[in-house]
Image (tube, helix red, strand yellow):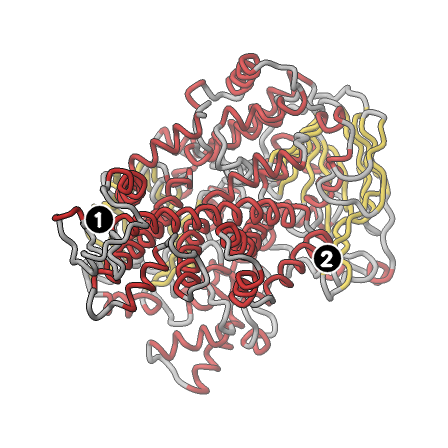
């Protein structure tokens, strides 16, 4: 008897079936990956197993856990099953933890509720569990509120709360999507460790995660199971066309791409840029420290780093969306000052921005045609309405959206379509620099490929310079000519694509590269070589700010700030750059 | 123009807008036309027909009051005044409140602090006391009621709009507009204001009944509309005095008042859905 047996599961809302005739099984101690693009029904399946679907869902088929049927049983029985027999970890731990209860109290209540332990014993078991999921100083975390923990720590606490009642099955729904790649590697290792007595059903869109951590995998497409099998076999010989498509679009670091030789002239110079924020009652937060960067026409520069590394602050200050504390920005020979509204029209036309959340960056009350036309109203007011609409249609056409999209509202678009609209709006002014702030992070693999191809095409045609802010190194590998790595607001390494991926100089760059999950079971990456998380920028470490997490750190790293050096064309800020 | 056509299509699909809007339109229409076709006049007293029950004979559909005046005509006059007061007061508070709140919220910083402290100061004035003072100091004037109610209601509107603007300002589409060079005025006009509509409409439809209630309350206290003019509040006041002998004098204006309030409340709830483009699937 399998631990979990799902047979002919069907989930319908009104007239639309989101899951159709899904059958699979999970054995004891097994780790199974459930993959698919957004809307493929993978999360719906997870919720159905735990009886968490909303009331208007019609569910058919059968779900058996340890032989007992879960569909159609009373809420009372389901409550006993949840937490004790099967538990779930969600994507966003901040949403899933109660902000009013201390972490320890939330876990203790689970034990008390299910009558598994009481009083002192319960407390001891909770602290034990917090230690097991790798929370440092568990006695202190026991008394902490969720907002006092960092994202990675919160996800650990969430996993602890899922495991506290010792379930036989743990369902993890995109458990690491909201986390940095280094923290993701830590969490995935944790899930691996606890698998000795808990089976894992891992739901993810990231094939790299599946390759490294699952023995078997199931591929869903629009609610239907199109392929299942051992992870190695599926990766080596995908039998279904959709699986092959997903694999082709999966992130890899070994993609061979031919970087275009950038023969352009200097377009944008950033010199010693610094940005700081005032945090009420807590002093100043130094977000960016003295960063230099020069961008040429026709090249793509990627800016990478964990969250809080200052990559967004840097470009926003350069664009004039937030004030710059000190430093100089020169664009096409003109020094830029002040906020974007005070800059000359030509400069404003020359630099455009595409955001991470495609739908959020479009005004929900405006139609696509008006959204894309708005920059023209400002910069080409002489254009007649007819000509303006013509130009908009041509622009949208070139991003792959036909005339039928002109009259739609943003909520009527998919993520990929909305991002195309945002790109069309940015490109209609024919800018010289396009900044993409995590512009493909929220998109599915195949859609991401299309958007990247679109940007590459525009670049080749027009010599556009692109600044790509991302935390996803596989995207960096695929699109950039040069890469700027930032840590706590400072430049740690600036190198050409091949140099950075071939011979990373800075220990931080190395750790980032090792942490990237690779969609290949034979050479799975995703190693957690970087312990802990980024320290608070309000109290930065002395000397080299990376030293508390660096495995090569020596005495000099604790006392002296490393100076930037150039080695074989790579700029690096590390005392030990030529030794390691 | 296209936006209006759009909204009209959405209105037509919403049943509660149609029903509550229809009832309201019916009441207003009767209030406008009724007194014209009725053989009676709101001033005309008839001492042969004091306190008559509602009857078809002599066309006293709603009966007569203690001076023998036709209650139908007087009620319809009351409806006119009540709705007029409410709508004008709401428009006053809408215009001042939205402009004030959107500017304070979008500009932010010191401007915001000064503007909102001014609102706080006005809040500290006891409203009813203030209105009563106005009424006593000046002639009891029609206009004064509009001004008084509108001048107080815009404070709430300004606060709500400012809060919404603060959160809208952080949205990425506003940054996108700034990047493309849209001026501050156009950002407020094209990007902030349309996204406020949902909240503003709901709030306006809450201020209309509130204004009606305040007007009725003032008239009930004898501070509102001057005889022989009348409003629903004044009619209810008169009805209370005759409650035991002539219950219709209380029940008819009270029922009219209640249905108008109910219609506005329903309308507000439904309008929010209509103006939210995301809900139009």
Query: In the rendered image, is residue B135 in sight?
Result: yes
Direction from residue A157 to residue A219 in the image, left or right:
left
Camera-side mark, 2 or 1: 1
Q: Nearer the viewer, residue A514 or A475?
A: A475
Residue appearing at x 50%, y 40% in the figure? A519
Q: Chain of mark 1?
A: A
Discs 2, 1 touching: Cβ within 8 Å: no
Q: Quadrant of the N terminus of chain A?
A: bottom left
- Residue B266 on image: x %, y %: 32, 50
Residue on which disc 2 sits: A550
**In the image, what residue occupies the spot 41% across and 63% down?**
B217
Q: Nearer the viewer, residue A119 or B256?
A: B256
Which residue is identified by label 1?
A: A58
Q: Secondary structure at mark 1?
A: strand
Residue sitting nearer the eye, A133 or B205: B205
Dot 1, how many residues are within 10 Å of its Cα: few (below 14), some (14-19), or many (20+)? some
Write down the quadrant of residue A66 in the picture: bottom left
Q: Is residue A299 visible?
A: no
- Residue B155: % across, % down: 56, 56
**Considering only vertical position in the picture, is A26 above or below A516?**
below
Residues tagged by mark 2 and mark 1 found on one chain of the structure: yes
Q: Is residue A383 left or right of residue B91?
A: right
Q: Chain of mark 2?
A: A
Residue B59 versus residue A248 in the image, above or below? below
Give SS at disc 2: loop
């Amino acid at each position: 008897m399998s631990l979990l047996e799902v047979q002919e599961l069907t989930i319908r809302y009104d007239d639309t079936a989101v899951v159709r005739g899904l059958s699979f099984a999970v054995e004891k101690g097994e780790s199974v990956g459930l993959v698919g693009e957004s809307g493929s029904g993978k999360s719906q399946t997870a919720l159905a197993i735990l009886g968490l679907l909303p009331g208007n869902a019609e569910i058919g088929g059968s779900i058996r856990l340890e032989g007992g049927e879960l569909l159609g049983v009373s809420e009372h029985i389901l409550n006993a099953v949840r937490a004790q027999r099967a538990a779930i970890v969600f994507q966003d731990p901040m949403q899933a933890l109660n902000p009013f209860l201390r972490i320890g109290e939330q876990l203790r209540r689970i034990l008390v509720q299910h009558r598994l332990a009481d009083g002192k014993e319960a407390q001891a078991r909770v602290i034990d569990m917090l230690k097991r999921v790798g929370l440092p100083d568990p006695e202190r975390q026991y008394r902490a509120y969720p907002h006092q923990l960092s994202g990675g720590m919160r996800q650990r606490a969430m996993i602890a709360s899922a495991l506290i009642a010792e379930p036989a099955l743990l369902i993890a729904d995109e458990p690491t999507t909201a986390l940095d790649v280094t923290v993701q590697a830590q969490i995935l290792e944790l899930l691996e460790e606890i698998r000795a007595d808990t089976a894992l059903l891992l739901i993810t869109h990231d094939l790299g995660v599946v390759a490294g951590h699952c023995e078997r995998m199931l591929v869903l497409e629009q609610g239907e199971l199109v392929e299942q099998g051992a992870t190695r076999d599926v990766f080596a010989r995908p039998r279904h066309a959709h699986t092959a498509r997903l694999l082709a679009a999966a992130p890899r670091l070994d993609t061979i791409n031919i970087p275009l030789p950038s023969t352009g002239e200097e377009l944008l110079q950033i010199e010693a840029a610094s940005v700081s924020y005032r945090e009420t009652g807590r002093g100043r937060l130094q977000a960016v420290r003295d960063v230099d960067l020069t961008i040429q026409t026709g090249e793509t520069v990627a800016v990478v780093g964990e969250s809080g590394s200052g990559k967004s602050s840097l470009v926003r200050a350069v664009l004039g969306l937030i004030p710059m504390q000190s430093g100089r920005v020169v664009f096409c020979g003109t020094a830029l000052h002040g906020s974007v509204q005070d800059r000359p029209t030509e400069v404003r036309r020359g630099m455009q921005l595409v955001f991470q959340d495609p739908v959020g960056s479009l005004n929900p009350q405006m139609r696509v045609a008006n959204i894309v036309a708005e920059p023209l109203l400002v910069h080409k007011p002489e254009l007649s309405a007819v000509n303006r609409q013509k130009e908009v249609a041509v622009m949208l056409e070139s991003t792959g959206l036909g005339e039928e999209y002109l009259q739609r509202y943003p909520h009527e678009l998919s993520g990929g379509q909305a991002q195309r609209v945002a790109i069309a709006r940015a490109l209609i002014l024919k800018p010289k620099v396009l900044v993409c702030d995590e512009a493909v992070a929220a998109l599915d693999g195949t859609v991401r490929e299309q958007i990247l191809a679109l940007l590459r095409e525009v670049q080749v045609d027009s010599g556009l310079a692109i600044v790509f802010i991302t935390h996803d190194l596989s995207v960096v590998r695929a699109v950039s000519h040069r890469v700027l790595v930032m840590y706590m607001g400072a430049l740690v390494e600036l190198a050409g694509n091949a140099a950075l991926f071939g011979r990373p100089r800075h220990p931080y760059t190395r750790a980032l590269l090792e942490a990237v999950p690779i969609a290949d079971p034979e050479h799975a990456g995703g190693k957690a070589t970087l312990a802990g998380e980024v320290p608070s920028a309000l109290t930065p470490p002395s000397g080299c700010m990376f030293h508390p997490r660096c495995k090569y750190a020596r005495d000099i790293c604790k006392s002296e700030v490393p100076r930037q050096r150039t080695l074989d064309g790579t700029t690096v800020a590390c005392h030990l750059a030529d030794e390691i | 123009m296209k936006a209006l056509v759009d909204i009209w299509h959405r209105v037509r699909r919403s049943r509660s807008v149609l029903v509550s809007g229809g009832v309201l339109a019916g009441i207003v229409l009767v209030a406008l036309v009724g007194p014209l076709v009725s053989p009676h006049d709101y001033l005309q007293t008839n001492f042969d027909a004091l306190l008559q029950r509602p009857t078809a004979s002599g066309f006293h559909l709603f009966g007569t009051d203690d001076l023998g005046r036709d209650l139908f005509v007087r009620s319809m006059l009351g409806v006119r005044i009540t709705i007029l007061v409410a709508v004008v007061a709401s428009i006053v508070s809408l215009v001042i409140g939205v402009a004030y709140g959107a500017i304070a919220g979008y500009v932010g910083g010191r401007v915001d602090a000064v503007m909102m402290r001014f609102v706080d100061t006005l809040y500290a004035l006891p409203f009813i006391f203030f209105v009563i003072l106005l009424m006593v100091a000046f002639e009891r004037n029609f206009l004064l009621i509009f001004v008084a109610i509108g001048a107080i209601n815009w404070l709430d509107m300004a606060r709500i709009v400012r809060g919404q603007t603060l959160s809208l300002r952080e949205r990425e589409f506003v940054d996108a507009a700034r990047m493309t060079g849209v001026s501050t005025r156009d950002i407020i006009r094209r990007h902030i204001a349309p996204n406020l509509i949902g909240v503003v409409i709901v709030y306006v439809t809450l201020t209309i009944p509130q204004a009606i209630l305040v007007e009725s309350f003032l008239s009930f206290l004898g501070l509102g509309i001057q005889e022989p003019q009348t409003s629903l509040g004044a009619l209810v006041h008169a009805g209370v005095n005759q409650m035991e002998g002539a219950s219709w004098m209380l029940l008819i204006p009270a029922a009219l008042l209640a249905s108008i309030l109910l219609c506005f409340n329903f309308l507000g709830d439904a309008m929010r859905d209509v103006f939210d483009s995301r809900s139009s699937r």
